[in-house]
Image (tube, rainbow, N blue to C red):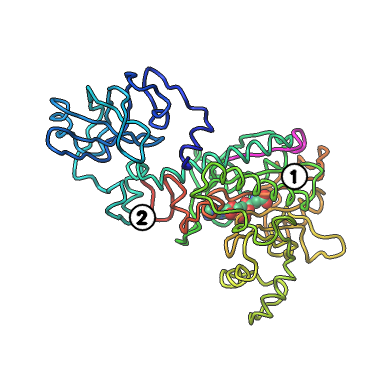
């Protein structure tokens, strides 16, 4: 059974509405049964008195045998047109198909007007820009479609794991009155003659929500005015944010480890062809869990590899690439210098220059960042001032810390970047339907 079949079977998709059979279910239909299949024509071979039409839907491909006036009508239908074929389930000589359909009628639902801007079968390659310009059509490419099936499944697994741990799913506003992550890279907008911003993250809300809901998570879009055009940055990205009262950053790393492992295991069962083995992602730490290196350990490793880094220096792309060659698979970098992390991250007792923070890395790519939060309102005010932020614009947030705020920790999972890694895609645009970057605003 191929990965698509596994995926569809997992959805228990054996019967379909209104006599319309999904391609994947055709093999289960008795010979002689009258059925309909809706999809798009991917291929048509005409050998005179008989023709073979290949129709694909979201689940797979069927072959229809056409003769007589149906053959004449099928000849006129351009490839990629949306059609409904009606006929009888019949034996086939095709090796890769369980049955075929002896077609007695073909109805065109939507004609594809040629020349099409791209070839979704992938026989003729197109640039990514061209593909993104007509993404709806690009999704008819099997590889592209599978990426988005994987994405849907992955978010589902993560949701289920979090819900099983008493996390409550929430939605926080995306139009906000002040920056959550500091002033840089904010999109500003006019909100009834007031200044408003698109949310960079749900950071302040999710922290406040631990007061009443204890454990929350949110799957949502966030916005950053990223001027740099890279393969891992978008102006709009999906983050899975979590926040939990009474847990510290080590326990959040435990949850992250479980989330990642469950996601890989589940995806691998459903998409064995597309998802690499856990060994690829975990190296030799499958039993022990994702290694947790401290920033200082990483600095030492890098300096031994010829870098010249001092405590407090940020780790550049190049440095992270070097680390990625030393640690294959996922690894955490924890206990970053306080000055490199946002105001809401707590410092270590007795080492104020170190923060209770972590990033999850895969090679050079940062996928997640999180930490234990500062929940003492006075410390929080001081941290804001130290980082040059106005306590006034955070006054709403600070108030909640005088209402009995529990200690709490959390993280933000860059879901698009996680999908890049899990689908072995080298550009974030491959795993986002309609990416937004400094050049791209449509479609
Ligand atoms: P941070 O800013 O590190 O942390 O973001 C969390 C994760 O989101 C992803 N990410 C992006 N993905 C695509 N395009 C971008 N422009 C982009 N920016 C960030 C990354 C990153 O690791 N509030 C904290 C999280 C927390 O502490 O809970 C935050 O937003 O994978």
State whether residue 257 is above or below residue 77: below
Kindly report which numbered mark, 2 or 1, lies closer to the viewer in this rendering: 2
Closer-to-camera residue (347/232): 232
* Mark 1 residue element: helix
Quarter holding the C terminus is top left
Magenta stretch contains residue 217: yes
Proximity of marks 2 and 1: CB atoms separated by less than 8 Å: no
Residue occupied by mark 1: 398
Residue 181 seen anywhere in this rendered image of the structure: no
Residue 360 in the image: above or below residue 244: below
Per the rendering, the mark at residue 319 is none
Q: How far apart are marks 2 and 1 (CA)?
A: 45 Å
Disc 2: which residue? 128
Task: Judge whether residue 246 is colored magenta.
Answer: no
Q: Give the range drawn in magenta.
A: 210-219
What residue appears at the point 76 percent right and 52 percent down from the top-left corner? 249
Extreme-right residue of the structure: 350
Q: Which sits earlier in the primary sequence, circle 2 or circle 1?
A: 2
């Amino acid at each position: 059974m191929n990965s698509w079949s596994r995926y569809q079977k997992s959805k228990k998709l054996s019967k379909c509405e209104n006599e319309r059979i999904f391609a994947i279910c055709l093999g289960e239909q008795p010979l002689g049964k009258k059925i309909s299949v809706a999809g798009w024509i991917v291929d048509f071979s005409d050998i005179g008195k008989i023709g073979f039409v290949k129709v694909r839907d979201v689940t797979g491909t069927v072959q229809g045998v056409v003769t007589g006036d149906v053959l004449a009508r099928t000849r006129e239908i351009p490839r990629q047109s949306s059609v409904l074929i009606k006929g009888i389930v019949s034996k086939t000589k095709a090796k890769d198909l369980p049955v075929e359909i002896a077609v007695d009628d073909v109805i065109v639902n939507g004609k594809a007007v040629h020349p099409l801007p791209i070839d979704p079968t992938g026989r003729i390659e197109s640039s990514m820009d061209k593909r993104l310009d007509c993404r709806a059509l690009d999704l008819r490419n099997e590889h592209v479609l599978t990426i988005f099936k994987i994405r849907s499944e992955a978010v589902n697994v993560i949701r289920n794991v979090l819900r099983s741990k008493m996390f409550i799913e929430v939605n926080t506003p995306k139009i906000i009155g002040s920056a959550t992550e500091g002033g840089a890279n904010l999109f500003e907008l006019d909100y009834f003659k007031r200044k408003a911003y698109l949310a960079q993250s749900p950071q302040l809300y999710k922290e406040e929500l631990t007061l009443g809901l204890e454990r929350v998570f949110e799957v949502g879009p966030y916005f950053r005015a990223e001027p740099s055009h890279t393969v891992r940055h978008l102006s709009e990205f999906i983050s899975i944010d979590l926040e939990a009262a009474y847990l510290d950053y080590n326990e959040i790393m435990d949850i992250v480890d479980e989330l990642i492992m469950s996601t890989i295991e589940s995806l691998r069962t459903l998409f064995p062809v597309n998802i690499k083995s856990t060994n690829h992602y975990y190296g030799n730490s499958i039993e022990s869990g994702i290694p947790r290196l401290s920033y200082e350990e990483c600095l030492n490793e890098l300096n031994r590899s010829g870098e010249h880094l001092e405590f407090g220096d940020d780790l550049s792309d190049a440095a992270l690439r070097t680390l990625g060659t030393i640690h294959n698979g996922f690894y955490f970098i924890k206990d970053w210098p306080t000055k490199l992390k946002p105001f809401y991250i707590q410092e270590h007792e007795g080492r104020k220059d170190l923060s209770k923070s972590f990033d999850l890395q895969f090679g050079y790519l940062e996928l997640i960042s999180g930490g234990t939060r500062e929940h003492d309102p006075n410390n929080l005010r001081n941290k804001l001032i130290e980082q040059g932020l106005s306590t006034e614009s955070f006054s709403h947030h600070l108030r909640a810390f005088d209402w009995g705020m529990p200690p709490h920790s959390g993280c933000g999972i860059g879901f698009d970047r996680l999908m890049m890694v899990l689908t072995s895609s080298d550009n974030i645009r491959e795993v986002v339907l309609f990416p937004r970057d400094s050049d791209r605003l449509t479609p």
